[in-house]
Image: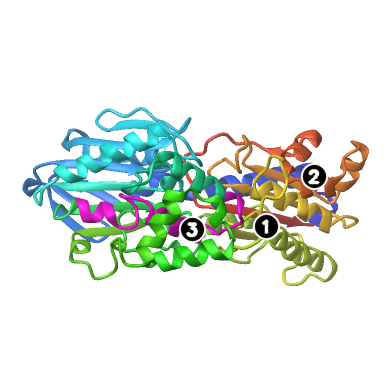
């Protein structure tokens, strides 16, 4: 039986290998090349064909953690046909480009470099004509990396709003609903500004369900949310007193009809835009599942759409792992249980961590006393919260090792200080920037 020969160390190596397989499936440059082909003057993109003899200029814009390798791929495909372009990425996520300017900016809190990048994107969109072609490269992180405040709102207001929304436990859908309604470029505004130029958005999805208006706050997609929805979100989390006055007044004015809504489905300028998803969490899970099978595990994928509280998700996953170990259901051992999506953390303490490290800690507490269970929870972008780790390992021995180190896991969890907990016992999972981003992968190995 494999369970008799697999050590915890080898199971951890397997988990890391399975994670890497998921990353390989959503490598941004390869994803661009899968969806875009250029033969002579014929450009084929996801079922559409463009005759480049009828295109005067090609522009490339974009924002997100994966936008640099996507831009590299477009430069390889189109070369000197690219007239101008600019993409904004997170600090440390750059690449060498020849025709397209690269800006590094702040994430998750937007900064002035991101604002200047967004202004340059807007200028390119404004100068494009119907005989031009615009590529927009969108990936996770684009919301923070493309900050262009609506009239009457300043960058400092957006920074404070971002901090409040990230700390209150709101989902990415809720956070981005607010972001869209205080932006001059997101929520479909970039598509409006670019029209009548043809605009093709190549999108690496980092949201559950791959909703176009949520990914990077949907700069080229119709917005399904309203100012009234934003007010409901503010009331739901009781954060009105924490938000900047300019933001609160803007949203209230919009809900009252004094400010125009974000562009909605049916607007004619969306007829010039094509949004194409080229990579997603589902693709990462499929490749991870295949790698697990090759390593001798019986793989089971739960869902790519996990949301909600991280600790609740950890309890759910731990229950499945315990049942698998005890009864061989819902999958026989040696088992690899996979899930994706993006959970949330409500910040109550003053520690350092992220949703994946907090998941791993809560999971370890739930499987204490069990045997032969290993967990790896990590962000596919290589970053978990405001830390240098992608996530963390935990296993059946984590609580025992913590006790030997004099650590109280309940205290670290209450303080949202999972990063320092795992750093003390050497169980952080550090990858560095992966230059992709399709939410999180959770890998449970049960032998």
Do tag 1 and tag 2 residues touch (Cβ < 8 Å)? no
Q: Residue at x 88, y 58 (%)?
A: 370
Residue 412, disc:
2
Q: Residue at x 84, y 50 (%)?
A: 410
Residue 406, disc:
none
Which of the marked residues, 2 or 3, is nearer the chain's N terminus? 3
Residue 310, disc:
1
Is residue 263 one of those drawn in magenta?
Answer: no
Residue furthest to the left in view is 54
Rounded to the nearest angstrom, the CA distance separating label 1 from label 2 is 15 Å
Q: Is the N terminus in the top left, top right, bottom left or bottom right quadrant?
A: bottom right
Instruction: Give coordinates of residue 188: x percent, y percent.
Output: 30, 57
Q: Residue at x 53, y 43 (%)?
A: 381
Rounded to the nearest angstrom, the CA distance separating label 1 from label 3 is 16 Å
Which of the marked residues, 1 or 3, is nearer the chain's N terminus? 3
Q: Is the C terminus in the top left, top right, bottom left or bottom right quadrant?
A: bottom right
Q: Residue at x 81, y 36 (%)?
A: 425
Left or right: 22 with respect to 220? right
Rounded to the nearest angstrom, the CA distance separating label 2 from label 3 is 28 Å
Which of the marked residues, 1 or 2, is nearer the chain's N terminus? 1
State which region is magenta. Answer: 166-193
Please identify, in this view, whether the residue under mark 2 or under mark 3 is nearer the observer: 2
**Callout 2: 10 Å neighbours few (<14), some, many (20+)?**
many
Between 272 and 340, the one lying in front of the other is 272
């Amino acid at each position: 039986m494999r369970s008799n020969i697999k050590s915890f160390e080898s199971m951890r190596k397997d988990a890391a290998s399975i994670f890497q397989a998921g990353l390989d499936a959503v490598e941004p440059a390869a994803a661009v090349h899968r969806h875009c082909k250029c033969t002579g003057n014929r450009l084929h993109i996801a079922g559409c064909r463009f005759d480049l003899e009828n295109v005067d200029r090609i522009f490339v814009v974009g924002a997100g953690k994966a936008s640099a390798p996507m831009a590299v791929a477009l430069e390889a495909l189109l070369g000197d046909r690219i007239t101008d372009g600019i993409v904004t990425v997170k600090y440390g996520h750059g690449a060498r480009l020849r025709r397209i300017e690269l800006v590094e900016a702040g994430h998750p809190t937007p900064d002035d470099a991101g604002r200047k990048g967004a202004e340059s994107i807007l200028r390119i969109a404004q100068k494009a004509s119907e005989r031009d072609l615009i590529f927009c490269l969108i990936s996770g992180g684009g919301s923070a990396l493309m900050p262009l405040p609506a009239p009457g709102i300043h960058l400092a207001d957006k920074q404070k709003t971002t901090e409040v929304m990230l700390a209150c436990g709101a989902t990415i859908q809720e956070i981005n609903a607010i972001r869209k309604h205080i932006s001059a470029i997101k929520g479909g505004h970039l598509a409006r500004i670019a029209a009548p130029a043809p605009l093709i958005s190549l999108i690496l999805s980092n949201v559950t369900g791959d909703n176009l208006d949520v990914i990077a706050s949907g700069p080229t997609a119709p917005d399904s949310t309203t100012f009234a929805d934003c007010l409901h979100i503010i009331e739901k989390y009781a954060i009105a007193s924490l938000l900047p006055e300019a933001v609160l007044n803007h949203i209230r004015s919009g809900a009252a009809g004094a400010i125009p809504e974000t562009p909605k489905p049916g607007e004619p300028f969306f007829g010039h835009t094509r949004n194409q998803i080229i990579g997603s969490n589902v693709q990462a899970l499929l490749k991870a599942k295949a790698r697990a099978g090759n390593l001798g595990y019986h793989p089971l994928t739960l869902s790519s759409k996990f949301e909600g509280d991280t600790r609740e998700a950890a309890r759910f996953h731990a229950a499945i792992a315990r049942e698998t170990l005890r009864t061989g259901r819902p999958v026989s051992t040696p088992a690899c249980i996979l899930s994706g999506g993006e959970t949330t953390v409500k910040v109550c303490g003053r520690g350092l961590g992220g949703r994946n490290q907090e998941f791993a800690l809560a999971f370890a507490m739930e499987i204490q006393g069990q045997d032969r269970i290993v967990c790896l929870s990590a962000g596919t972008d290589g970053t978990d919260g405001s830390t240098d780790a992608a996530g963390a390992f935990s296993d059946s021995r984590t609580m025992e090792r913590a006790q030997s180190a004099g650590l109280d896991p309940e205290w670290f969890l209450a303080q949202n200080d999972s990063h320092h907990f795992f750093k003390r016992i050497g169980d952080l999972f550090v990858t560095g920037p992966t230059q992709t981003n399709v939410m999180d992968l959770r890998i449970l190995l049960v032998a």
